[in-house]
Image (cartoon, rainbow, N blue to C red):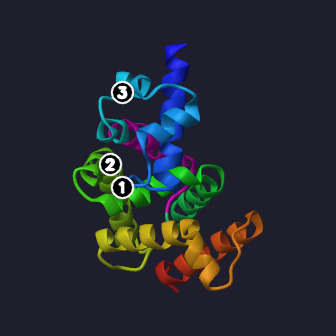
Amino acid sequence: DARTTHDRLLDAALESFGTKGYDATSLDQLANELGVRKQTILYYHPSKVALLDAVIDRSATELTDALEDAAARSGGGFDRIEAIVRSVFRLAVRRPELLGLLREVTRLGPPASNRILDVFEPMIERATGFLASEMDAGHLRRCDARLLLVSVYSTIVGVATEVEVLRAVGIEPSLRSAAQRRREVIEFLRAALVPD
């Protein structure tokens, strides 16, 4: 079934781009893993860049849906931030290749990073507006909402996904350590953001 082959291709490409990186991924290697010819991949996506674009589009939508769902199910103030942190850590454990792809696309820069930013921009605007309104209401400490968003993103994604950095500081990545890191990040953000 062509749909199944295409889904398998996108899944394998996401895994490879998100764990090995774009440069270390080859269409020949993907074809070999999938048990198809390279021409089959090129039938769906005429180049490696086109395949990356398709993986970015699919993954950005999945990430956005997960974060928007977490935000919608939470209350206001810090509860929403905590719900999003929990959602990101859940993704880091269940689908680490998604966050790995996000890191890789950021590293690659334009045009790949612009592509993912186009999908994320409406969510970024809503998040920035939410943070600003929570600051205005006195629920969060006053600061630059966009800079806060970047700082929170960097903290969460870094602590959730930087396996080699964790090992370098003596933390062996596991489900238990992920839960501990999640708790620590939530408490760190609570101390930094919630007024006394």
User: Which residue, given by chain and number where applicable, does mark 1 sit on?
Assistant: 105
**Disc number lying in front (1 or 3):** 3
CB within 8 Å, label 1 to label 2: yes
Please tell me whether mark 1 or mark 2 is closer to you in this view.
1
Direction from residue 176 to residue 70 in the image, left or right: left
Circle nearer the viewer, 2 or 3: 3
> Quick one: label 2 or label 3, which is nearer the N terminus?
3
* Element at label 1: helix
Classified by dominant secondary structure, the portion drawn in magenta counts as helix
Q: What residue type is disc 3 on?
A: Leu
Q: Are marks 1 and 3 in contact (CB under 8 Å)?
A: no
The x, y position of residue 93, in whole percent, is 65, 56
Earlier sequence position, callout 1 versus callout 3 = 3
Q: Residue at x 54, y 46 (%)?
A: 15
The magenta stretch is 53-76
Label 1 or label 2, whichever comes before in sequence order: 1
Q: Nearer the viewer, residue 163 or 124?
A: 163
Q: Which residue is mark 3?
A: 42
Q: Rounded to the nearest whole Å, what is the CA distance between mark 1 and mark 3?
A: 21 Å
Q: Amino acid at mark 2?
A: Ile
In the structure shown, which secondary structural element does the residue marked by tag 3 occupy? helix
**Does residue 188 lie above or below 15 as drawn?**
below
Residue 128 visible, this angle:
no
Residue 110 falls in image quadrant: bottom left
Say whether residue 12 is magenta.
no
Residue in the picture at 35% in, 79% down: 142
Is there CB contact under 8 Å for labels 2 and 3?
Answer: no
Residue in front for this viewpoint, 120 or 94: 94
State how far apart marks 2 and 3 are (Cα).
22 Å
Can you identify the residue that label 2 sits on?
Answer: 116
